[in-house]
Each structure stands twice: as structure tokens, then as C-alpha cells.
Image: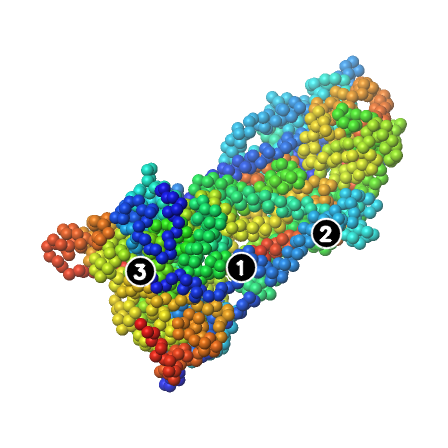
Amino acid sequence: MTDTGTPPLVRLQDLNVKFVTRESTVSAVNDVNLTLKAGEVLCIIGESGSGKSVSMRALMRLLPERRARITGTVEVDGKDVLSLKGKELSDLRGGLVSMIFQEPMTALDPVYTVGHQIAETVRRHEGCTYDQGMERALELLELVKVPSAERRLRAFPHELSGGLRQRAMIAMALSCRPKLLLADEPTTALDATVQIQVLILLRKIQAEMGMGVIFVTHDLGVAAEIADRVAVMYAGRIVETGTVQEVLGNPKHPYTQGMLSSTVHGNMRGKDIEAIPGSPPDLRAMPPGCAFAPRCKYAEAACTTALPPEVIFDAGRMARCIKVAPDSVRQKELVPAE
Amino acid sequence: MANITMSPADAVAVQGAPAVRVRSYWQNVGYRLRYDYLTLFFGAMVMLILLSAVFAPLLAPMDPYESSLINRLKPIGYKDFILGTDELGRDILSRMLYGGRISLTMGIMPVLVATLVGGTLGIVAGFVGGRTNMLIMRVVDVFYAFPSILLAVAISGAMGGGVVNGMLSLTLVFIPPLCRVAETATSQVRNLDFVEAARATGAKTFSIIRVHILGNVLGPILVYSSSMVSVSILLASGLSFLGLGVTPPEPDWGLMLNTLRQAIYINPVVCAIPGVAILITSICFNLVSDGLRSAMDVRL
Amino acid sequence: ALPASAESVLRVAMTAGDIPVTIGQPDQGFEGYRFVGYNLYDTLTLWDLSQGETAADIKPGLATSWDIDPNDHTRWIVKLREGVKWHDGCDFVAEDVAWNFARVSDDKAPQFNAKQFADIRNRTGIIDKVEVIDDHTVAFITKQPDALFPYQLSYWFMISRCKLTELGNDYEKYAVDPSGTGPYKFASMVAQERLELVKNADYWDEKRIPKHDRLVLIPMPEATTRAAALLSGQVDFIEAPSPDTIPRLESSGMTIVTAPYPHNWSYQLNFVDGAFKDVKVRRAANYALNRSEFKALLGGYMIEGYGIVPPSTPYYGKPEYVYEYDPEKATALLKEAGCHPCKITLAISTSGSGQMQPLPMNELVKSQLDAVGFDTTLDVMDWNALLDVGRPGREKNPQIDGINISRALQDPFSALIRHVYTLQHAPKGSNWGHYTNPEVDTVIDEIYAAFDPQVRMEKLTKLHEMMVDDATMLMVAHDVNPRAIAPNVKGFVQAQSWFQDLTPIVVE
Amino acid sequence: MIAYILRRLLFVIPIALGVSIVCFALVYIAPGDPLNTLLPEDASAETIAMVKKAYGFDKPIPVQYFIWLGKVLTGDFGNSIASGRAVTDDLFKALGNTILLAGGAVVVAFSLAFVMGLVAGYHSGGPVDRAVTGIAVIGVSIPNYWLGIVLVIIFAVELNVLPATGMGPRGSDTFNFWEWDHFRHLLMPMLTLSMIPIGIITRTTRAAVAEVLNQDFVETLRAKGLGEREILVHVIKNALPQVLAVMGLQFGYLMGGSILVETIFTWPGTGFLLNKAILTRDLPVLQGTILVLAMIFVATNLVIDLLQTMVDPRLKRS
Amino acid sequence: MTVTEDTRKAPALSAVDRKDLRDRGGERQPMLIARELKKHFPITGGVFNRAVGHVRAVDGVSFTVMKGETLGVVGESGCGKSTLARLLMHLIEPDSGELIFDGDAVGEKDGLLVRDMRRLMQMVFQDSYSSLNPRMPVEDSIAYGKKVHGASEAEAKAAARELLTKVGLDPNLFGPRYPHELSGGQKQRVNIARALVLEPRVVILDEAVSALDKSVEAQVLNLLRYLKQHFNLTYVFISHDLNVVQYVSDRVLVMYLGEVVEIGPVDEIYENPKHPYTQALLASRLSMDPDDRIEEPPLVGDPPNPINPPSGCRFRTRCKHAEKICEIDRPILGEWLSAEAHVTACHMFVPNSGHSVAAGAPVPPTPKRTEAAMAGGD
Ligand SMILES: Nc1ncnc2c1ncn2[C@@H]1O[C@H](COP(=O)(O)OP(=O)(O)OP(=O)(O)O)[C@@H](O)[C@H]1O
Ligand SMILES: Nc1ncnc2c1ncn2[C@@H]1O[C@H](COP(=O)(O)OP(=O)(O)OP(=O)(O)O)[C@@H](O)[C@H]1O
Ligand SMILES: [Mg+2]
Ligand SMILES: [Mg+2]
């Protein structure tokens, strides 16, 4: 994973996040390695509870300090995020890195107007007056194509439709021209027609501003629509990475394959869907081997004894499965017989 | 139409071992309480206080009514009077123990009755809605428009002193807020899909309330009413203090506080005992109620 | 604070919950009479409160003399004091007396006031009419001959006709602008909090011109509060400190003054329905009480009650029965009466004017009675409810055998007659338990007809002895009315009366 | 918004009517005759009947109610049976004194409790939280009249630094909040009275702040890089509606609930008036006082309701 | 509904019999006919809290559901899908319109009682969490419906356990659990079991799979397919996921702002959508091919306020074909009663409607975007 030349915008090295409570310890993120180049869009795909959101929050150190144990390296634009203190950290948040959340309804403060919330961010990072902040907020709302932006500036979140709220959220995230945008399932709560609008908007703005984007989703279609590269997460681990074409076109990990095959599309009428059986493991008691093994149709004894290594094919193309190791003779078995 | 490849048996096979230990909601509450040492401690205190009241006849070293004027207003530890004596030379410890019976009854009974009455009214109002709700809640609103102490004093003052009147007035004071809590909880639960689903099976109103509503609103109602116990103890003692609650020579903490007040210059420590008892009891009930609240506030 | 030299102020904490009304007959019981009535107003006959050795008696007030018409024992000729001026400057004349009578008797008169009427009716009810003979003489025609009539006049306050007429007979206005002939003049009032009076330098009785400039009366019903207020220097003079606070007050240098006075903490008994209709049981109860324990309970601040009136009363006499503590005798009497255990119910109150320490005292009574073979139930109620039991008489509550309402015994009628006279059966009068004894009635009739003070005194003494011997009450204690006074307050003499004279007090 | 206010006002009418009925009825369930204290102990039956008539107590109760209501609507609460003074005068003077006392207690309680609750909620779970929660629990558990007595003993009797009773050297009429000599009288009752609200508001604020801090948008605020102080502003504004509601309730309680404390300190307010009216069964005073206090409570709730609507835009209707 | 005890015994596991003894109206009689269903929720306000407006949640919806078929219902959020489902279940009373169940009018004098109808028609809710009683073991939740209709405790329990097996959950393992001890997919299986315990003929699935992960969604969809054949069910399948609807449905109904804009057999709709809204909706589907991205949003703006819907055609504010006529005239859905019909409520498909592209129009001009469309859903 060594990429010479420009340093990566984001580098995660052996990131581990555990939530410790009296009753149990949840291993939410386990040994995650990831890099993101400037201007690149990375999609993290995974089932619910696979640790996508936790990884994103770890990037901004938004996890509850007292309960979350973060280890490993988190570097954004050369800064070691885990060692930042006070002001440095809050300068990073919203300035260098900003974030869009899944539920814009709950992610916006219900008692302040949308305009205020944007202006406040601008003021925080650019030290301007409130009025200048409001002006900028107006520009931003226009940028994200909010109709009648002037009126919406003074609207409260609950007065906006889901799509508009999410656009306001995006405007807020963009307010200080971040280098890195984190988007945690920003379109999941939206209607199909609105979702595509937002996706296209995000893509356009990303291209214009040259931001790096990490985009979390569990919808392969969304990834196909927006991603440059894809990382697939399962039970707190990244099990496969690659460009979007590679991963969606030629999935290597059995889990990725299962995801693809269980996604419904039109021409499957009357046939059963090839669903992945079972459900994900309990993160409080992780199995020692491959976490996917109990649901994997290729699983064998070796899978459950030790953690499979990261098998690296090219720069940025990885799969964590013993069956895809280049030296493995059993590799062709991976293509299941029709 | 015959290509069913997956039989349900397959699905069972892959569901695997249970992911979590099976615990019911109440077991869960119990589990959380088990580790809440503060609550456990104060719970034990409450038990102790209750038991000492229940077994007062066995525990009390002396007759709480027997006076002896030679021994009036003696300090703590005088002769056999562990906590000293009152203005008639009666043993304070014995009176405190017996007094607990009345004070705690005055604290707990009104809340209990109000929980039953107010809870029922609230659940009915919340579930049935419409006109019934209007009728019940408007009446409740009227009583709610009186600050509780004002209402308690006004009713007690109107009906005259006595334990029964005192309890009656406190009950009336607690019915409206409990009714409101029950109504709010019920109308929240009522809108959840599982109640809709129950209606969709054609179930009758009463059956739905009994099976689906009750179990879900009991928690909040109980938490609220447990927090009312200490309020009730305080109000009851206040009434007795004003001469509206318990009548002498019955030992009651509030009343003892009132009568001992005259002697505060002679023996201030002894005069403080009933006050301290009220304070401690109230604190215990409050903290237990808090513990219960946080134990029951489990997001499932 | 004001400079010390400016004026001397006496601040008094009363036990009342509010300022007594200032429109003539005060409310708040005799405390109202004590602090507002006799300070702002005068009565025709006044109480002589200048000494504390013997029980106070009446003396000339606005009337200088009163004489029964020798030919007509229902006609009293009363000479009025001359040269007396109302606080508003008008002269006091005979017409004022007639006008004041209409005020409390004639509901057609513009100055009539229902509450005042109710308040004084028991005293003035006997008057049939008032005749103005000249500017300073009036005649009272009573409905029956009444030798005790001059005592009744001592409760009836004269208010200013000039002032009330000027105010359009509006008593609400008059209340904050009253005018009397008393030793103090009204200065200001904050309802419920304080009444300020200033000295009337032109008072007709020069000896009683106040020796301080200003009198501040503060209602303070809580005994502990009064003590605290005195200790923290907020007042100079407090009424009725509770016995348990007295040691503390004394240790802080306060003076405690006491004096016996016509007060009786006792139970009126039911002579018709229950066990007390038997004189043996009544005597047994009286023998059962160890009155020295009550004294201990009250820190010594009482007089043991063996009679209806305190022993210093002129007509106390020498009753045959002296109910010294004798439990054996009590038990024996009960057995003799065939009432053992003897179930009785006593109605008591939690508080109330003159009730001293009602709860502990009643509890003590119960325990002593029970010790000799009674089985006592205390029926505890609030003061109002007890009055409600007291007023209609025993018929309404036959299950009650005794009521604990302490009565004022200021004059012979109040002290003796009303409790035992057949004509005073409740609800018409105060004979709650319907005591009837033809001998007693005869003596009372003689008293009413005895216009010779000597004879009257003999008869009264006889009546009192008869009442004690027949155990017409369960007698417990006489209050000594302790008062606590700050060290800088001098000159107060406590009279043996419900009423007190504050005018000689000097505030240093 | 104006329609909303009007509607809320409209809702108050039936409540007010109900309250007036309750107030009026309350004193009639009472045993004992209201005229008892008015009349001498040995008043005769005819005297009683005559006075009853003079006070209008001989009419049927519903008729009495309507007569009373009619007068009340014109601001006439009748005259006190005991003192003969107009109830309106006494009542509103007492109300002024109570407002002074309750207002003082409110200021003390609200500011102290809000700050303590805020700090505790912000550090929920920590030692500060525990300390504050402890104080709050004591505040709600202590019998405040008892505390009042203890304070008097300490500060008035033993230390002799504060007056034990009353409202000033010359009574309430001349009370001057800004003069130390007067203000001293206010201190102890105010402190005593503020204990319960301190406890309750602290607890509410703490819970509300902790709850708001758990909401998603706080994460957004952190993600925007706002400092803790700026976040606090958001948290306060969000917690405010809840806290306001409780504060309103507490203010109402203070107005009507100071019976014990006012009695202890002989503070000439409504509680004192009420206590006396109960003991002497002074019907007009009792009815008037209870009615006015209940109406103040209703009004307070109304104002708080409107305030909440103003703070929380989600509550704004049509 | 007179059904003897015997006939309601569950069909054998393997036998898939299209003949249902409960059938009354015959095989050709539609299972369900909804006619002009309307539900307007009042919006209150003003001083007297009177209704100041109405949310026209369902505004004259008519359709048929054939026996044994799956009718898919699609539409944007807030277009009235759930309201429609609740209307069908009579969980809320319609303001007007009628419902005919297997030939019997529901809730009318001489028709089918609502209570009886509820035995024959059941519903699965979207929110798998709130649709189970959190204080009840799931098997009791399932058994409850049975008990309501008079079964004994043991019978009900047995039925519940049998159904748990049928939805793929081991009754010993899962029966005594509480909802919070189940995953989303498992909970939804329980919900389905609960709906089936009364042996209904029709099941309404309101977004029954929307909240699930893709892999779980696939499991549940398979289960639904299996159950449908096993129990001879008719489904009304509500979803906003067009792919899923295409997968499960025989016919599809498209809703917009409380109205039906298009209805027809699934292949017809997906291959040849007529209504501009249906077209836009279908065009918004994401493809799985990263090289085939959508560059222009097929539809802009949000749906208008349902309190004050646009006059005429409700879609006209966002429609690129909107013309004067669309503002004046409300387009009528055509002959909707037959199973094969593919009809749409759009002026462009009504000959001589006045729309320029309708058959019989003088000159067919090129479609133009209107101002309204640009402004979005203000
Ligand atoms: N604050 C926390 N305390 C304890 N456990 C947590 C906390 N936050 C998350 N987790 C656990 O960490 C795991 C990963 O959660 P995460 O939110 O990252 O999942 P996700 O992939 O984002 O899922 P979704 O698609 O549902 O958003 C979950 O099992 C979750 O229960
Ligand atoms: N009880 C109600 N009172 C008032 N309005 C309601 C009520 N229920 C639904 N609505 C409104 O009716 C409209 C349709 O709601 P409905 O829930 O049927 O939509 P939906 O299509 O199911 O949406 P979603 O896809 O979000 O579930 C919405 O505008 C909603 O706000
Ligand atoms: Mg997530
Ligand atoms: Mg819906």
C-alpha cells in the first residue's frame, strides 16, 4: 500500500475501535487499513452494524471519549488526528474535514434556522461576522440548488422536505471548502427520485471542488453511481477493496459476491434470489477466524481457525480471504458451478 | 410456479446459536439494578425503614403513648431513652418507630390509590381518545390548575384534620398528575404499530388494553408514582405540621416535629430527630425512584 | 433605623393571627379587647388594672357613677364623665351612648353593624332601651333586674358618632380612621401585620397617659416565632411564650412576668347523657388528676385548678371538697358509681384561644384518668369544630361527655352563672351540659336581685362553693399568663385580669 | 401565532370556570360553620340566624355561587368574615408580598439550579454530576418548613444576624427591596423557599441537558468544529423548553405553595393569609385566595406554554 | 363469512392448491375492489381549532386486486401508500368510497363485517421494531390474534410455533424471545408469521422489506414468495424500491400525491411506462454498472404540498410535458377494473384531451419544460 509521490489525503493504519462497557466490549472496527487520495471518491459498503459509521466518526474523533477505545493511526492531510488537542481538533472538524449524516432531520439542530447553522460554521472557521456568514450561507444554498434559497435560509429544519434538508446539510458541510468530505449514508432516507438528484449534485460539487470523499452506503447501486473506489466492510473489517468497476464487476470476496447476488433486479422475476443465509456475527464475541465463514458457502476448517490475511492484488486491490490468495490453487473454485 | 428452492428449514439451519442471552424486559431491569449499588443501598434503607415501621411493636423499647413528666425533654441517651424523650416524657425512639407507620402510610397509600385511580383513568382516556379523553382530561386539567400543596391544604382544611381526611386529600392531589402521565404514555403506545396490528386482528378494546397497553405503560407510571412517594411524605408531614393531618396523640413524624418545635430551645437535637427522619426517608425514596427510572429507561 | 431619641416605641407580639378589628368591639377574643379595645376606646365602666395583688374589678370609666333606681330595679342611672373629647375633637356626650346602643341593637339604624351586634349582644342584650336624661346622664332600662349589669358595661366600647357619620357610616373606612376616647390614638395599620398607635396626650385620666410615644402591635400566632422575634430584638414584649422557651428567654435576660387571672382550663361536662350525670364520677375524675404534673409540664407556669375560679378571686370561698390527687378515692368512687372501667369521650381541640398547650395537657389528662379506671377517648378536632360542638349543647353530640373549651371568667356571670343556670341551657346560653339544680338556680336568682355589693359577694361565694362541691366541671388549671419582656422595657405591672394596662411602660 | 395565543386563552376559560367551582365547593364540604369564629362562643341561635342572613349564607348554595361568581368577575371577592376588610385589598397586598418572596426565590432557585443542572448534565456520570445530584436530591427531600425553623434558630436566635420574622422594621407597606435593613428580612424565607425548586429544576435541567447531548445534532455541531461553549448555547436552547415548563410549574408552586414557609416566617403573603383563613374558616378569603392562586398557576402555565412555543419552533402551530 | 372449522385447517405443506374453499365469488371475481377511496386528514388551526385545510392523503383511489396475484404499489414518500393500506384494513375509516372483498361490500349493512374481513386480510408493517410488543415474547405476539378469535391458549401457541417454523425461525430458539433480542430480518419474519396466523387470504405488506439490509431483504423476499404459494395468498405489496416491486409484482399501481397515476401489468409498466411520473421514477433507478451512470436527474424538485395540491393534473408542476390543459382538467384514469388493463391518468393518452401530444391533436409539438418544473416543489 505504499503510494509514492503525493501523500494520501487519508491514511488509516490498523485502526481499531472498541466500545467498552461494564457488560461487554464491542469490537466495532478491527484492523482497518485504508488510504484515500485527494479528489478521490471512496465508497464503503457494508451491512448494517458492520462498522462503517464508527470508522467515519473515528476519522473525526467524534466517538464518545470515555467509552470508545481507538488505537492505530488516523492521518488526514498529514495530521495525526488521534493526537490532536482542543483547538487543533476543532479546527480540523468542519474546516479540513466535514461530514454529512444519514438523517438530516436529527442531525440538524431543530431550534435554529438552517441559515444560522450554516453561518455559524462559516463564522467559526473563517472568523467573519454573522451577516457575512449568512451571505455565504445563501451562496451555499444556491450552490446546492435549493430553490428559493433566500426563504429557506430562515426556515427551520422541520419545515423542509427530506431532500431539501439533506441539501442544507451538504451546504453546511461544504461551507468551509473541506478537503475531505465524509458522507454517512446521506441518501438512504431519501426517495429514489430525490436520491439521484442528491447523488448527481454531490458528484458535481466534488468534481468542482476537488474534494476527497468517503461515502458510506449499503446500496451497491449508489456506489456504482458515485464511487471511484470501493471498500467492502464486514463485521468491522475491510474484506475487499478495489476500483468500483473491479469490485462490482469482478468481486473476489465471497461476501461481496453474495451482496451482489442478493441485490434484486428486474430480470429475476419468478426465481429465488441467491440470498446470503444467516446474519452477521455478534461484535461482542467475534470468532477468531474469518467472521464471514459461518455464512460462507466456500468455508472450510482453515477459515475458522485464523484470521485470513489481506491478499493484495494491485495497489488498492485487496481481498481478505484465504481462498483468493494468488498462490492458492483452489482459487478457481471461487467461481461457483452454475 | 414450482421452483421453490429455499425451504424454511434451510433458514432455520442458518439462524445459528442465539446471539444474546434471553432476558425479558423486567429481568433486564433487575439485571441493571443488581449493579446499581447506590440504588441497592438506598433500596435496602427503604426496606429497613418500612420493616421498622411494620415491626414497630416488636422493636419499640417502650410504649409510645406512655408519658412521664419527670422525664420530659431528656437528651439523647438519657437512661433507657436511646433518642431521648418528648415534651410529655415519652420515648422518642418508640414514637419514631410507631410514627413511621403513620407517616409512611400517609406517604404511600395516597400514591397507591392515586396510581390505581389516576392510572386507570389515564389509560382509558389515552386509549379511547375522543370525547372520553376530552371529558376526563378537562376535569383533570381543572384539578391540575391548583398547585399541589395548595390543593392538599385546601382540601384538608376544608374537610378538617385526621389521617383519613389527610390521605383523601393527598390522593386527590396525586390523581391528576398520575392520570396525565398515564394518558401521555398510553397515547404514545397507542400509536405504535403493534397496537394497530392488534386492532387489525379484530381484538376488542379491553383485550388490547390488558394485553398490549398495560405492559408498556406500567413502567412509566410506576416510575412516576414511585417518585411521588417522597413528595407525598413531605406533603403529609406538612399537613400534620399545619395541624391538618394526623391528630394527636398519634405519633407521626410531621406532628412530632410540630409539637417538639416548642421545645427547640431546650433540647434542639431531640427536636430535630423527626425532621431528620423525614429528610432521610424522603431521600431514600427519591434515590430509589431515580435508580428505578434509570434501570427502566432501557432502550431495547 | 431611626435615631433612638426620636420617639420611644413599644413593640408587642400578640398571639392573634391578625390585627383585631378597630371599629369598636374587637375580634380575636379578649386579646383584641386587651390591645385594641381598651387602648383605642373606653367603656362606661373600666377595669382597674393598676395592681397585681388581687383580682381586678371594675372602676369608673366614661361613666363616673352608676346607680340602680331604688324604685325600679330595671333602671340604672349612669352619670357620664364630663370634658372627655374624642380623638377627632368632638365632645363625648350622652347622645353618643344612645347612638352606640342603636349601633349594636337596631338593625334599622344607619350605624348598625351586624358583626358588632353579634359580638356584644350577650352583654347588651339585657338592655331594653337607653334614655338620654341630659348631656351627661343616661338611664338604662334592663329587661330584667340584673345586679351584675355594671360588669356588662365594661365590655361595650364607645366609638365616635362624629367620625362614623362623617365617613358615611362606612365601617371599612372607619377601620382605618377610627376615633375613640382611649389612651392611644390610631396611627397606621398594615393589615395582618401591624397596628401602630400613638399616645393620646390629652387622655382624660392623666395617670394613664402612656409613658411611651408609640405602641406597635404585631400579630404573631406562632409561639416559637414570638420567642425568636424577642430574642432577635424584633419586638420588646411578647404574649404567652410557651413554657419550654421560657428558660431560654430568661437566660437571655428577658423578664418573665406572670399573675393569676380569671381563667380556667377545664372541661364542661355532660350532665344528661353519659357517666358524668353521676356526681361520684365527676368527683372521681377530679380526684384522679395529679395537678402538679401539669405544673411540671408547663414549667411551673400555671396554678393548680381546684375551683372554678382562681383562689385569689374574692368569691372563691371555702368549698367543702378539695380535689387533691387521690387515685384510690377516685377508683373507689368509680366502683361505687358502678362505672368501672368508665368509658368517657372528651372533645378537645388542637389549638385555640386560651387553650394553653391543648395537646400535651389533654394527653396527660387522659393518661391520669385512665390510671384510675376511666377509659378515655379523646376526640380531637380543630378549634372551629370544637366550637361547633360547644355551641349547640350536648343534645347535638350526646356521645361526648366533656368539652375542653377554656372560658374567660372575667366577671361573675361569665365565671359562674352561665355554666350552671337552667336559663342558660345551650343553645340559648353557655350551659353546654344542661346542668340543672334548683338550689343553684335559686342562688343565682338571688344574685341578680342583690344590688347590695356585700350581699352579692356572699351569694357569689356560696354559688362557687356549690359548684365546686357538685363538681360541675373537671377542673385542671388556671393560666398565669406568662409574658416575656425585653430588659429595656420597664414599668409593667401585670394585673390579675384578661386585660392589661400598657400605659405605664417605659421603653429605655 | 396570534391565533394560537387566542386559542390557548380560550382553552383557559373552561378551566377557569371549573377552578372557580372547585374553589367555591371546597369550603362547602367543610364541616363546621363559617360563622363560628365570627361569633362569640355563647352567641344564641337567633343571633346566628340574623348574622347568617346579613352575610347571605342563608341562600341556596348554587345561588350563592352565582352571586359570588358575578362579584368575582367584577373584582369583588366580598369582605372577610373575620376582619370585615375587603378581601380584594388584603388578597392583592398579600399577593404582592408573595410575589416578592416567590420572585426572589425564583431568581435564586432558577439561576442556581440552571447552572448546576447544566454543569451536571454536561458532565453526566462524573463526580461533579454526583455532587450536584446529591444536592438536588436533598433539596427535593428536605421538609422546607423544618429547614426554615433551623435557619431561624441559627441565624436569628443564636447568631442574631438576621431577623426571625416579618417583612421589615415597619411592615410590608414600606418594604424596600434595595435597602439592606429590609432585604435582610427576605433572605431566610427566600432561601428556604428556594430549596425545593432548586432540587427539581436542577434535576430537570440535568436530565434535559444530558438528553440533548445525546441527540444526533450535537455530533453535527462537533463535526462542524464548534467549541464547547458554542455547543453549550445550542444545548441550552434545546433544553430550554423542558426546563421552562418545569420552571413555570415551580413558580406556580411557589406562589401557592409557600403556606408553610410563610407561616414559619410570618411573611404576610397569600400562604399566610390562606393558613389563617383555613384556621378561622374565613370563607370569602379562602375562596378568593385559592381562586386567585389557582388562576395565577393557570396563567403561569399559559405564559410558559407560549414561551416554549417561542423557543421551540417545532411547537409553533398555524 | 361462514367457514367451518375443518376448512380452515392449514393446507398441507407441499400441496399448492389454487382452489380455496373460502372462495365465494369464484375465481374470476377480484379479491378486492377499491372504489374511489378517499381520506382527507384535517389540519386544524385558528382560534377555534377548526379544520383550516385537509391533507388529501388518499384522494379517490380505485383499483382491483385479483385472486392470487401480487399488486405492487409504488410512489414517493408521503404519497399516501400507508394511508391506503390502513384504509384497506379499515384501521382508519375512509371519508368516502367503498371496498369490496370477494364480492362482498365491507362494513356495510348487508356486507362483510369489518371484524370478519380482518380475519381474511392482514397487514405487515414497515417498522419491524414498533410493530411488535416489546414486552411480549414473540410467540405470544403471534398467538394473540388466534386467541382473539376464540382459540384456546394451547391451540394458539401451537399455531404460533408452527408458523414460526414456516417463516424459518426455530420456535424453541426464537419463540420465547423478546423483540429486542431479534435482528431486523428476524423481527420481520415474526411480523409476517403474526399476519399469517389467522390464515388470511390477503396480506398487505407496507414497506415490509424496506428497512432491511440487502442480504436480509433477499431472504425475506424469498420467504414471501414461498409463503404465497404455500398459503395461496394474495399480496398487496407497497414499496418505494422499484426493483423489488418489479421482482415481486404481477401488476403495479403507481401513486402520486394521493392519486393513482398509472396501473397495469408489471412488464407493461416497466417496459412501456406511459405517465411522465412513472417514466421519471423508473429512470431514477440506479444501475449496478459504474460505467452507466445517470448524468441528469430525471425529475427535479420535491412533491408539492398535499394540503394544497396543484389543480388539474397534480404532477404538472414537475412535468416536462405540462400544458394549459393539465392545469385546467384533472385527467381521469381509464378503464381500471380489468386485470389486464394498462391505464394511466394523463392527458397525453386521452384522445382529443386538448393536450398537444394526445391522439387527435392538431400539431404535435416538442415537449417543453415549464417554469414550474424548473422551480421544483416549492
Ligand atoms: N457508542 C457506541 N457504543 C457501543 N457500541 C456502539 C456505539 N456506536 C456503535 N456501536 C456498535 O458498533 C457497531 C458498528 O456500528 P456502526 O454504526 O459503525 O454500523 P454501520 O455500519 O454504520 O451500520 P448502519 O448501516 O446501520 O449505519 C455496531 O454493532 C454498533 O452497535
Ligand atoms: N394521522 C394523520 N394525520 C394527518 N396527516 C396524516 C396522517 N397520516 C398520514 N398523514 C399525511 O398523509 C400523507 C400520506 O401519508 P402516508 O403515510 O400514507 O404516506 P406514504 O406514502 O406511506 O409515505 P412513506 O413512504 O413515507 O411511508 C402524508 O402527507 C402524511 O403527512
Ligand atoms: Mg451507520
Ligand atoms: Mg408509509
* Position of A16 relative to B203 (above/below): below
Sequence order check, earlier mark of 3 and 2:
3
Q: Residue at label 3?
A: B2
Dot 2 falls on a residue whose secondary structure is helix
Q: Residues within 10 Å of mark 2 (few under 14, many from 20)?
A: many
Are discs 3 and 2 located on one and the same chain? yes
| Residue type (three-letter) at the residue carrying disc 1 | Arg
Residue at position x 37%, y 82% in the image:
A329
Which chain letter matches label 2? B
Which chain letter matches label 3? B
Residue at position x 36%, y 69% in the image:
A259
Q: Residue at label 1?
A: B23
| Residue type (three-letter) at the residue carrying disc 3 | Ala
**What is the C-alpha distance between the residues marked 2 and 1?**
44 Å
Q: Residue at label 2?
A: B273
Q: Residues within 10 Å of mark 1 (few under 14, many from 20)?
A: some
Residue C396, image x, y percentages? 69, 26
Q: Is residue E80 left or right of residue C209?
A: left
Dot 1 falls on a residue whose secondary structure is loop
Dot 3 falls on a residue whose secondary structure is loop
